[in-house]
Amino acid sequence: MGMEDGIERLQKWEGRREEGGRRERERERERERERERARRERERERERERERERERERERGRERESMSPSLAI
């Protein structure tokens, strides 16, 4: 009886350990998804900033074109 109780306790412990490992892996996957989402958001923000800079350059080009030729740089 004592040995069977020990084996049963060991099996329960193993089951809890395995379940804990599964939960930890799921938490790690969730953290990885969050890191990836944040990386994509930063990349989108950088692209928006590049587009704003290109628009500012186009605007400066239009301003230079509208000046008289003697004032254009």
Image: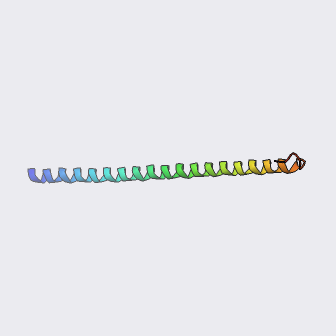
In the rendered picture of this protein, how many numbered marks are placed on residues? 0
Residue 1 seen in this snapshot: no
Horizontal side of 21 relative to 50 (left or right) equals: left
What residue is drawn where x is 75% and y is 49%?
Answer: 57
Give the image location of residue 68, x and y in percent.
Answer: 90, 48
What residue is drawn where x is 23% and y is 53%?
Answer: 14
Coloring applied to the structure: rainbow
For the residue pair 1 and 35, the one nearer the viewer reads as: 35
What residue is drawn where x is 22% and y is 50%?
Answer: 13
Residue 11 seen in this snapshot: yes
What residue is drawn where x is 83% and y is 48%?
Answer: 64
Give the image location of residue 47, x and y in percent.
Answer: 64, 52
Give the image location of residue 28, x and y in percent.
Answer: 40, 51
Give the image location of residue 50, x and y in percent.
Answer: 66, 50
Horizontal side of 25 relative to 41 (left or right) equals: left
Horizontal side of 59 relative to 46 (left or right) equals: right
For the residue pair 31 and 55, the one nearer the viewer reads as: 55
Hey, which residue is sitting farthest right in the picture?
Answer: 68
Hey, which residue is sitting farthest front in the picture?
Answer: 70
For the residue pair 33 and 43, the one nearer the viewer reads as: 43
Hey, which residue is sitting farthest top in the picture?
Answer: 71
